[in-house]
Each structure stands twice: as structure tokens, then as C-alpha cells.
Image (spheres, grey):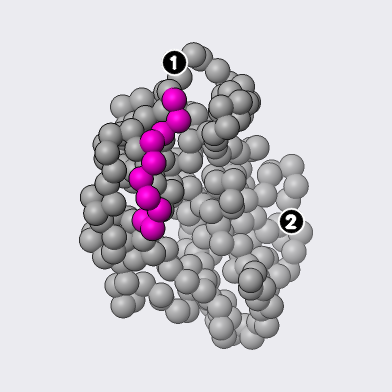
Amino acid sequence: MKKVCTFIFLFLFSKNSLESNNAGSFKLHKGMDVPFVNFSLIPSTSPLKLSKKICFGQCLKNEFCSFVVFKNGICSLHTEYALTRLVNNPNLSVVYKKEFIINHCSNTPCMNGATCVNKLEEYICICDLGYFGKNCEKSINTYGCLPDNYRLNETDICKPCSSGFSTYNNYPFNCYKKDNVQRNIESANLFCQSLNSFLWTPKTRTERNIFASYRAWVHSKIDYVGEPFVWPDGLEVYGMANGEPNNLNGDNNLLN
């Protein structure tokens, strides 16, 4: 069942913060600014003219929004990566960082060295190498299969991969086919579909580590510089390096 939340805001105004009674608050970063185009959730060609209250409400409802820049009546919402692009501007106080009132990570639910990510109504555990599960409580080694055999999940039996596909590093939940032909993302996706498979979606650190020394197409794309990367099911792409995605320093010509 898809849960839909309706936010009823009761804002408390002070000099340094604007707070909701049940969702989150915004902390002012004094003397800080961030250029509109840096990791904005809205293309610079479509600025939003909103009141500050509605602007902050938009950020609270957007799971990818970590910062609000409210300047000259223009609202821009930014991802967490905007943190690396904040600049000193003592004449402006326009940058507000979103903070959740409830910290779902406070009781340290994630196990085995995992990183806990606090969200509005839940938490997500980013598992360390070799673990998976809601709280990263399961060891992949427990569910290993014979070479080039796989299982769809921990309750499935091990089955042989299709011809031409292999498993790697004792990661039994996918079979892979490495193709050394240079393709763009569209032709790579079509090639995978022709084999009744799908383009790579390495959501876990364990799976990304399999091809750590290779470049590969993954099933995620952005339409403008700064847009958050998501998987086809809408989940956020976690585990990028500091400052990424920067599209080779923000080159619009490389979006495709």
C-alpha cells in the first residue's frame, strides 16, 4: 500500500530557523550562498517564485532536498551535494539546511558497520561489504551458491545462470554478462533487453565492488546537471564519492 502524507504546517519563526511541528526544521547558514545551478532539484530555466513558507514546505516533502536557497523571492531546492558548493557571502543569509525533528537512526538500527541514513518517516541502512537486509543483518556468505549459479533471494534455491552469464565474488543474487563492445547507454540497454536481462543496477556496495576497476553502464541517468540519480524504481543512488555526481565538473554536453 502506498502511504500518502498530508503535511499540516505550524511554523515557528525565529531569527535563525523556521520549524514545523511534525516534520522538520531549517537551520540558517549565515553568510553562505550557493549558485542556483549547483545540484539544484529544479533546472535554472524554471525558477520557483514562492513564499518562504511554501518553499520550505516543498523541501520537506522532497526526499532529495537537503538545502533551500531563498533569495530575492526565488526558491531553489538543492541536494545534499550542494554542501560541497557553499560559498562565503557575508552580505547574504539565504541558505537553509533541512533537519528532521525525529532521528530514526538514534537507536543505531544498522548492523555490521553499515551507515544509517535518516529520512522523513524511516531510515535506510547502507550495508558494508558482504552484508544485506533491512538492517544489514544478513551475511551474503550464508547464501552462497556454486560458481555461476544464482538465487533470486535468500529463500530461493540456487539455479544455473543463463548461457554466457556468470556470477562473481560469491555474490549469488545476480548473473552478469560483460560485453566489451563500446555502446552508448541506449544501445547498451537494448542489448541487455535482447538477452532477456537488464542493465546493471548495483545498489549495494558489495555488488559495486565486483567491478570496481571497470567502467560500466548503469541503469540510471540525469537530464540536467545537479538532478539526483535514482534507480528505475525511484530509489536514490547511494554511495557516490564526495562531490559526485558532478558530470565531469558540470559539463552539460556530457549528460548523454
Q: Residues within 10 Å of mark 1 (few under 14, many from 20)?
A: few
Q: Residues within 10 Å of mark 2 (few under 14, many from 20)?
A: some
Main SS class of the magenta portion in the image: loop
What element does badge 2 sit on? Answer: strand
Horizontal side of residue 156 vs 171, given as left or right: right
Highlighted range, magenta: 154-163
Distance from the alpha carbon under mark 2 to that under mark 1 = 44 Å
Q: Is residue 236 visible?
A: yes
Q: Which residue is labeled 2 in the image?
A: 48
Q: Position of residue 159 (x, y in %)?
A: 39, 41
Q: Amino acid at mark 1?
A: Asn
Q: Amino acid at mark 2?
A: Leu
Quadrant where the N terminus lies? bottom right
Q: Residue at x 64, y 69 (%)?
A: 2
Q: Residue at x 45, y 30 (%)?
A: 162
Q: Position of residue 254 (x, y in %)?
A: 58, 25
Report which quarter residue 185 is drawn in.
top right
8 or 160: nearer the eye?
160
Quadrant where the C terminus lies? top right
Q: Which residue is labeled 1 in the image?
A: 180
What element does badge 1 sit on? Answer: loop
Residue 199 numbered tag: none
Q: In the rendered view, would you say 152 is above or below 210?
A: below
